[in-house]
Image (cartoon, rainbow, N blue to C red):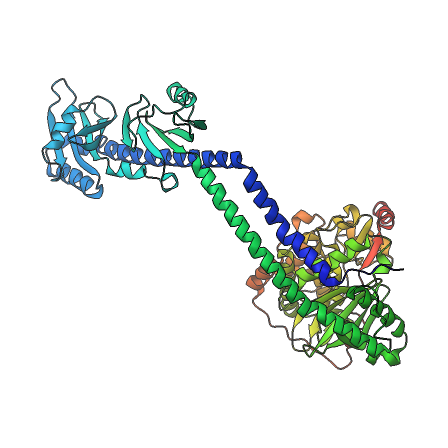
Amino acid sequence: MKSKALPLIAWIVLGLLLVGLLPFAITAYQIRANQDSLVSQVQQTHLVSVDATADKVSSYVLGLQNLLRSIADNQNFLTQLQSKLSDELLASTLLIQNEVLAIAVYTKDDAQRLEKIAQKNTVGSLAQSILQQASEDALQAITLNDQSYLVIRQPTVDGKYVALMLVDRVKLQELLTVPALNDAVLGLSSGRNEIIDGHVNNYAGFPDNLRTLVEARYVGSAADNFVGNNGTRQVAAFARVTGTDWIIFSQQPADKAEIARQDMWKAAIRALLAVSLLCAIFAFAAHTKIIKPIREMVLAQKRLLGTNSADTSGSEIDQLRQSFSLLERQLKNKSKLQSVSLGRYQIEDVIASGSMGTIFRGWDPRLEREVAIKTIKIGKIESNFDRHQLVAKLVKEAKIVAKIIHPNIVTIYDAVDAQEIAFIAMEFVDGISLEDYLQRYTTIPPLQAVALATSILRGLGEAHRRSIIHRDIKASNVLLGYNGSIKLSDFGVASLTSKTFRVDSYVIGTPGYIAPETIYKSAYSEMSDMFAVGVLLYRCLVGDSPFRGASIKQTFSLTGAYEPPPPCKLNRNIPEPLSNVVMTLLSKNPLMRPNNAAMVADSLEQALGVQKWAPNFSNDISKVGEHVGLVTEMLPDTVVRKMKLAKNE
């Protein structure tokens, strides 16, 4: 007795629970458990804030010192101390620096006679009194009548005088107000337990290990957490102010970490509930928009194929696979083709067929539009790859490509897999392939080739931006619409082996377009796609592939060793900038090729102008089908290794 398979909706709900809820549940648990790490994080944030404050204070003090030094080093000022010029210099300095209250020049002898002073009206005669009390230190903090000042001292360049600057400490106090430390005590000290400014009277409450580091003077900054005298956990930090003897120190209760943890825990719970609600909404939407239509499609297919609609087994996907199997059998009878559906798509005609798949022209009755449906026979390559990995990759990369809405890329509409076959529904391009066009005209005029190249490169650039490597760029994968569009196709198959997916022992691509590094090292990258674009453009300009050999072996040998002549040497009508771009793309060394397709397109348009694509579609050109969609060749690595021997022959 067969066990009943889980319905598709059950798998969707399980997937949503695992993908959506599990990460939030783990995060909520970690937040609840890791209090110590949060304390460490608060400590680190504390240290960063103190370091940044020290840097700001250092920059501020250094700016004032440099301002005073510029006056003390001014020879014209010193030689004309009593002139109007010196008055104007000091007055302008006071005007542009709001916090500078006075600037004075004293003799450097024992008398220390005042030679010159400029002061603001707000400070009056008090400035001279403060400056006379200043010590010999280059930088000194003074408090007088509950007012805080800085005195900066600088000897003049001639050694005869000393210049002093009186500065209001309001700006310094503003620097010590840090929003990130709004509940912390923050202070500026000379390092000798002497508080210069801040919101604390001393730093005696600092832990012993930090006080030792402060006094040792060989550590620039440090932080620690400890249990204070009141029994609460504290975080503390200090940082030295460069260019001074000062330090910035701060202390803060660590309960901020616990508050943050509680807030994060509550936020995680709210997010968990929100994600649960979203999962329920997505599950309902999936049932309404996906599961129900699939069931309707299966029933409709069974009716169209003449099978018993009551004879169902397995999940909706199993039933769809059964429909695929029956579809494959009925395709042998062309007369029944019009009555066949592939999923929700009605099959109308066969466009092309290959050993690994078929391309159909179909109709989407729901959206009332023509589509191209490309089937891929999973069974043909299943022995070489893990099927589940391959199918998952197909669907995943088809979704990625489906997000690319670009005028130069065939849009992907859908991707579905069954037991032996998978298919991609994509935009139907009413036109011909570039292969068909070249079969008729052999070459393309140079300026038309520029228009073609820029379109292909812009489409490829958008794919590369999303980490999709095509791996099989060739003329049959470029579609030319009768409406003038140029579209790069076959990303549905190329995405099976994007650069994030390893294909051991197999080389993907078409001989003649495969880059040398892919042949000899199985290496794929944006540059390998760029090499294929170079081959394609060379053929469009010259009329033949640069590495076409009599056999695959010879083609690989030419690709690895032969240096084709530049197109401009074969046809003088080909502009040299265009020829140079093609030859750069054909470089044997991938590092010599450009890796940005869009930039190459821009450079072509800058050199040769923006060209309009104007193809000549004659009635004797075969329509899309004869050359389009030939399935990417998968060459075993052992065969490629044998091809390498041709390089030495």
Q: Quadrant of residue 575?
A: bottom right
Residue 141: percent from left, percent from top: 24, 28
Between 496 and 278, which is closer to the camera in this rendering?
278
* Residue furthest top in the image: 110
Tell me the quadrant of the picture where the N terminus can be found: bottom right
Question: Is 135 on the left or on the right of 610, as rendered?
Answer: left
Question: Is 141 on the left or on the right of 285, as rendered?
Answer: left
User: What is the tally of numbered marks visible in this picture?
Assistant: 0
Question: Is 269 on the left or on the right of 139, as rendered?
Answer: right
Residue 316: percent from left, percent from top: 78, 66
Q: Residue visible at 78% across and 55% down? A: 390
Is residue 342 visible from the viewing direction of this image?
no
Q: Is residue 343 above or below residue 533?
A: below
Residue 412: percent from left, percent from top: 69, 67
Q: Residue visible at 63% across and 73% down? A: 613
Is residue 638 visible from the viewing direction of this image?
yes
Q: Quadrant of residue 456?
A: bottom right
Residue 354: percent from left, percent from top: 85, 66
Question: Is 332 on the left or on the right of 160, as rendered?
Answer: right
Q: Is residue 52 above or below residue 548?
A: above
